Image (spheres, rainbow, N blue to C red):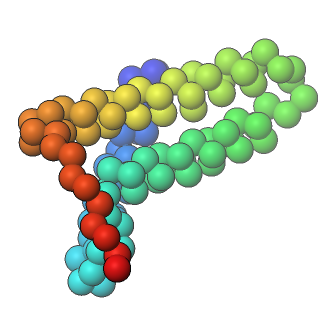
Amino acid sequence: MALTILVGYALVYFAGKYGAYFLNLLFKRVIFGNLRYAGLGALLIAGIFVTWLIGRSIAGTGGYAWGYLFGSYVVFPIMVVTMGVAITIWREGRKNGARQTTPKKLY
């Protein structure tokens, strides 16, 4: 069951990432500068929606059941997917040399 939830959240992440990419193509300009952050935003919205569903479905049953479901269906999968994205960003930065650039002056 936990693997199914992880796969579902990963699919939401990739849908958000490639949805932002296709919006950039559609409007022929950069609306979303970093597509990974757009995917994480979609992941956060899905987590809020699942939290609302959990809260609505078990109203009045007690705090323990809600806390367990919130942790196993929202917090853990979002944490795993976010760590995967963070590791990917970190490895890509190391592969590209991780050179720091100074910001451009606006004047």
Q: Quadrant of residue 104?
A: bottom left
Q: For the C terminus, which image quadrant?
A: bottom left
Q: Is residue 74 visible?
A: yes
Between 43 and 38, which is closer to the camera in this rendering? 38
Q: Position of residue 26 (x, y in %)?
A: 27, 81
Q: Quadrant of residue 64?
A: top right
Tell me the residue at 36%/39% (across/down). Answer: 10
Q: Which residue in the rendered view is the most extreme toward the bottom?
A: 27
Q: Position of residue 50 (x, y in %)?
A: 61, 42
| Number of dots carrying numbers | 0
Q: Position of residue 47 (x, y in %)?
A: 57, 42
Q: Quadrant of residue 21?
A: bottom left
Between 103 and 30, which is closer to the camera in this rendering? 103
In the rendered image, the vertical position of residue 62 relative to residue 54, given as above or below: above
In the rendered image, the vertical position of residue 71 relative to residue 16, given as above or below: above
In the rendered image, the vertical position of residue 65 relative to residue 39, given as above or below: above
In the rendered image, the vertical position of residue 6 relative to residue 8, given as above or below: above
Tell me the residue at 34%/76% (across/down). Answer: 106
Tell me the residue at 63%/45% (across/down). Answer: 48
Q: Is residue 43 left or right of residue 53?
A: left
Q: Is residue 78 left or right of residue 105?
A: right
Tell me the residue at 51%/24% (across/down). Answer: 76
Q: Position of residue 44 (x, y in %)?
A: 53, 46
Between 102 and 80, which is closer to the camera in this rendering? 102
Q: Is residue 54 left or right of residue 46?
A: right
Q: Is residue 92 visible?
A: no
Q: Which residue in the rendered view is the most extreme toward the front?
A: 107
